[in-house]
Amino acid sequence: MADPHPPGLNEEGELEGSSGRHGGILRQFWDSTIGKKIVVAVSGSILGLYLIVHMLGNLKGFQGPGGGEPEIDVYGEWLREVGSPALPEQGALWVVRAILLLALVLHVVAIVQLSRRNLAAKPKGHRPPRIQRSLASRTMLLSGLVLLAFVVFHVLQFTTATIQTTPIVEGEVYANLYAAFQEWYFVVFYVVSMGLLALHLRHGAWSLTQTMGWDKPNRNPTLRRTATALAVVVSLGFAAVPLGFWLGIVPEPTSEAAATAASGEPR
């Protein structure tokens, strides 16, 4: 009969001997299965909160060019200057970016380690019973990998301007978005990525309630609907921006950056 607790794992799913070797509350917390699940939940919550704020900021693009000073450009300038003069320009922005990067790394590492731990806990040759899972649950790995690639591409395109297949003018957010989303392949890539975000966010939000012990039979229908509504609203909010520019719902920019964008010459 297969050992229900494979070597290296105790009954709580912890690595045997790890606490004694390394010591420390934080190390014990990280080494435990429940600790990693809490890290996934908390880091996911930080990333989810950022997504909501970022989505609301992006929707400022629908306020149009604003007579040469688009509201989304004003918002972008405010983000760069918030905290000054106490902080240097973009100081607060880089603090937020560092927090987000740390949350993303912890989120990915904890998920990978949990997945490996689950595989190690399965007895060899044992076929677990088939459990009906939702589409969001079945595609978590795929959606996570695609979204990670999307984040890297998005940063390289709009933040660092490393990828300039369309013109990028520093400080001209509206014109940059308009130029990028005149290309159908960018629109498709962004919209498909947001569809996967909806699946990932829905399952993540629902899993958060389970990890934190908030799920109860009488609450679960409401919690599931809330997770679904959150995922749909956030993903549609993000997808609306590229679609708005591509379909002509959002007008052409009127600033000098528009001329640069139209010329096809990157900065």
Image: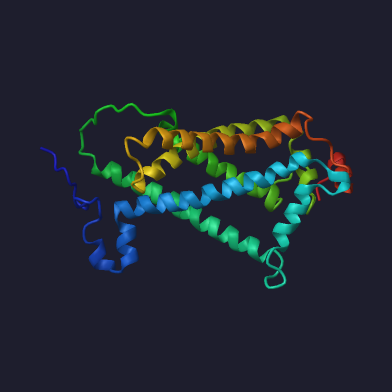
Instruction: Tell whether 144 sits left or right of 207.
Output: right
Residue drawn at (59%, 59%) of the image: 96
Q: Nearer the viewer, residue 229 or 68?
A: 229
Residue drawn at (37%, 37%) of the image: 219
Instruction: Tell whether 49 sits left or right of 137.
Output: right
Residue 1 figure quarter = top left
Residue 58: x and y in percent read 68, 44
Residue 17: x and y in percent read 21, 61
| Residue sitting at the far left | 1
Residue 209 figure quarter = top left
Q: Nearer the viewer, residue 85 or 138?
A: 85
Residue drawn at (29%, 62%) of the image: 28
| Residue sitting at the far front | 218
Asked whether residue 165 appears in the rendered view, the answer is no
Asked whether residue 220 appears in the rendered view, the answer is yes
Residue 233 figure quarter = top right
Residue 258: x and y in percent read 86, 43
Q: Is residue 159 above or below residue 146?
A: below
Residue drawn at (42%, 49%) of the image: 41
